[in-house]
Amino acid sequence: MHASVCDFIIDCVQNSIEANAEEILLFLYESTDDFSIKIIDNGAGMTDEEVQNAVDPFYTDGSKHKERKVGLGIPFMIQSVEQVSGKWAINSKKGRGTELSFNFPLNNIDTPPIGDISGMLLQVLMFDGDFELKFDRVLVRDSSELKYTISRLELKEVLGDLNSADSLILAKQYLRSQEEDLIEGDS
Amino acid sequence: MAKMTLEELRKLRNQKKDELDKRDTEGKDVHIIIGMGTCGIAAGAKDSLDAFLDEIEKNKIDNVTVKQTGCMGLCYVEPTVEVKVPEMPDTIYGNVDAETARNIVREHVLGKKLVSEHVFDRPSKDIVKE
């Protein structure tokens, strides 16, 4: 089981990348009592039967780990979300893409900590491939809405190879400054 | 830290590029591949990644590629890290916490010496000092 909400997000975004998505939209919407995540991709998509398999921990198509008999990414997310009375939904169309959403109520004592959002983002940006990842982070407090957006292709255009240590060091500073600005705006 | 704009990021990137262009880095490519599957993350691979990046920056090492990979089948010694440095055997290290990550940069990448107590695969026994 994962230690933080961010770890579930990494798994789910990785699913989109492995489904050969060219564009992934990742929304994080945080209010005082709720943390909602939505991931929309234009990857391979799934039939209804494949969606049923994806939520079954004891199913794997065996393409990722040959010897492994389980596929735990989405089932882990579902288990954690349901334990704290959150909700989840998967809408997928074969050949079109998948929309996955889930939320954690922040006032439930068993909700895992959110985790390090800029670290999570750095990790998903580091995955191999030319995919675009558009990240929308929204923090809602009372009546105000604080937010920032990140585009992977925009970052790549500025920094070049996102696997060179130099680029990663700068990307980390950049992502951290966005998140810190949001938190400062909140205090 | 004030919120950085993309233009400021571009400026920093260009500054760094100018510095790099002045140095002779040909053929000195270093590859660091961190196991960041569920087992790696659970064991603290994110802290190791942060420590690697920080130590690389501190020591101003050029031409380092940092990648992530999934589970390498060594879950019991996560975080695992594969290190490829010219003139050194490709090495898989285990139990790489933040401090060990810093040691790997200082001793393996810069000092060209294996961090023997963390070697889990690749170099044959006679290379690793007990």
Image (tube, helix red, strand yellow):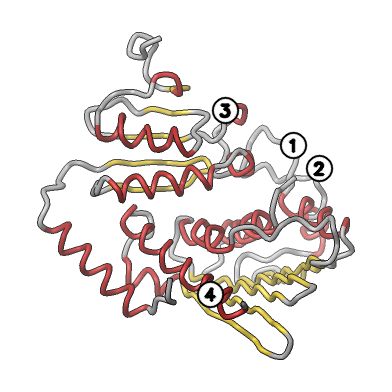
Asked if badge 2 and badge 4 are on a common chain, one would say yes
Residue A163: image quadrant is: bottom left
Asked if badge 4 and badge 1 are on a common chain, one would say yes
Mark 3 falls within which chain? B
Please, what secondary structure does the residue beneath circle 3 have? Answer: helix
Residue at 39% in and 37% down: B102
Asked if badge 3 and badge 2 are on a common chain, one would say no
Is residue A114 in view from this perspective?
A: yes
Distance from Cα at disc 3 to Cα at disc 2: 25 Å
The residue that mark 1 highlights is A69
Distance from Cα at disc 2 to Cα at disc 1: 6 Å
Up-down: is B129 above or below B85? Answer: above
* Amino acid at pointer 2: Phe
* Amino acid at pointer 4: Lys
Please, what secondary structure does the residue beneath circle 2 have? Answer: loop
Q: Which mark is residue A58?
A: 2
Distance from Cα at disc 2 to Cα at disc 4: 32 Å
* Amino acid at pointer 3: Val
The residue that mark 4 highlights is A134
Q: Are marks 3 and 2 in contact (CB under 8 Å)?
A: no
Q: Are marks 2 and 1 in contact (CB under 8 Å)?
A: yes
- Closer to the N terminus: mark 4 or mark 1? 1
Q: Are marks 3 and 1 in contact (CB under 8 Å)?
A: no
Mark 1 falls within which chain? A
Distance from Cα at disc 4 to Cα at disc 1: 33 Å
Residue at 34% in and 41% down: B31
The residue that mark 3 highlights is B77
- Closer to the N terminus: mark 2 or mark 1? 2
Q: Nearer the viewer, mark 2 or mark 4?
A: 4
Please provide percent x and percent y for residue A65.
63, 39
- Closer to the N terminus: mark 2 or mark 4? 2
* Amino acid at pointer 1: Lys
